[in-house]
Image (tube, rainbow, N blue to C red):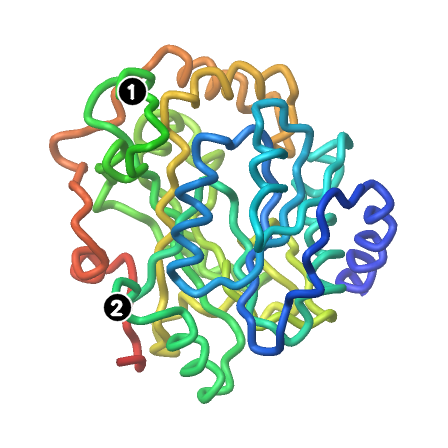
Amino acid sequence: MRRRRLLLRAVRKSRELDCLTDRTDQIKPGDILATATIRNECDRLPGFLDHYRRMGVSQFLVVDNGSDDGSTEMLMSQPDVSVWSTPHSYKASRFGMDWLAYLKMRYAHGHWCVTVDADELLIYPGHDDKPLHSLTNWLDQQGVDFFSAILLDMYPREALGQQGTDPSDDVISRLPWFSGYEYSWEWRPKTKSISVRGGPRERVFFTENPDFTPHLNKTPLVKWSRRYVDFHSTHTLLPRRLNAGLDRRLNLPSGVLLHTKFLDSILEKSSEEKERRQHFTYTDRYDDYYDQIMAQPVLWDAQQSVKYEGWQQLEDLGLLTRGRWQ
């Protein structure tokens, strides 16, 4: 019943969307799609699109939530991107999930679909020489229609806001560090998922309130059905069986989402989001979080920080798995 209510809600929320560029007639059977809700991501979008194109994504369905930095025009100029615009509340749309649920219901049924933010780059075992179709074909053969990943916060060696903002640089070269250790894994029977927490945000910002630390478990890749819906963003989905990808007993491959949140632009974005109050359910809990970011802390730690070298390194650290694949 909850899933049906959310799907009906998505249909109602579709009235908030204004289609700017529609290239969905180019979607072919077997195409892998990507969906995202974005706002003022012009510095990330070239690298984001290039990453997923190289991986094998054929078409992008993007909701632009009031960008004023040129993101809208940049997306509309791309030959494989369909763009919808809305000025309505991101929070009131379940953080963009209502809008994307409608688009996936209409265009993604029967397609493998990546649902990510513009600051999330999906990495899976062998991604550098095996296209995403190789992974999805194997999952199809196993009768598995989901693929889970851990959100891995990437950050610079120096204090936030001091690494430079040249968008021509590879984003990972600007944010080459991550926390390699001390993540907690907790079984959640209600959602049949494994919650993962830890990393620099818990270590730096939420030491006194670890329960406020963002969840890092996600299911960003699903062979979509119009009966499915993202429940708590892509952290948990309905039906609940889609949340099982990090259960090591199933011996399935899993991936990592390289999270490029901490570019220099994080200072301006944090100031704006503290005022907009659109990114958390309980916004009052996170005022101090935004204040700490704007104080330009150093996230790098001598004991915890590891410089990113590739997916094999992440496998050695237990952050992604090949499972039965390969």
Q: How crowded is mark 2: few (under 14 residues within 10 Å), some or many (20 or more)?
A: few
**Quadrant of residue 25 in the image?**
bottom right
Q: Up-down: is 29 above or below 164?
A: below
Q: Do the CB atoms of the residues marked 2 and 1 lie less than 8 Å apart?
A: no
Q: Is residue 118 left or right of residue 295?
A: right
Q: What element carries label 2?
A: loop
Q: Where residue 156 sits in the image (x, y, percent)?
A: 24, 28
Vertical order, 63 against 221 (above or below): above
Q: How crowded is mark 1: few (under 14 residues within 10 Å), some or many (20 or more)?
A: few
Image position, residue 217 (x, y; %): 44, 53
Which residue corresponds to the image point at 37% horizontal and 55% vertical from the top-left?
A: 185
Q: Which of 80 and 111 is in front in this view?
A: 80
Which amino acid is tagged 2? Asp
Q: How many marks?
A: 2
Residue 77 lies in what quarter of the image?
top right
Q: Name the residue under label 2.
A: 129
Depth check, front residue: 97 or 282: 97
The residue shown at (36%, 66%) is 254
Q: What residue appears at the point 28 percent right and 72 percent down from the top-left corner?
A: 322
Report the residue that reaches farthest toward the left.
302
Name the quarter where the C terminus is drawn.
Answer: bottom left
Position of 306 with respect to 262 (left or right) is left
Q: What residue type is labelled 1?
A: Gly
Mark positioned earlier in the residue sequence (2 or 1): 2
Mark 1 residue element: loop
Where, by quadrant of the figure, is residue 67 drawn? top right
**Which label is found at residue 193?**
none
Distance from disc 2 to disc 1, alpha carbons, whole Å, reads: 30 Å
Can you say which quadrant of the picture contains the N terminus? bottom right
Q: In this view, does 113 lie to the left or right of 89?
A: left
- Write down the residue under mark 1: 164
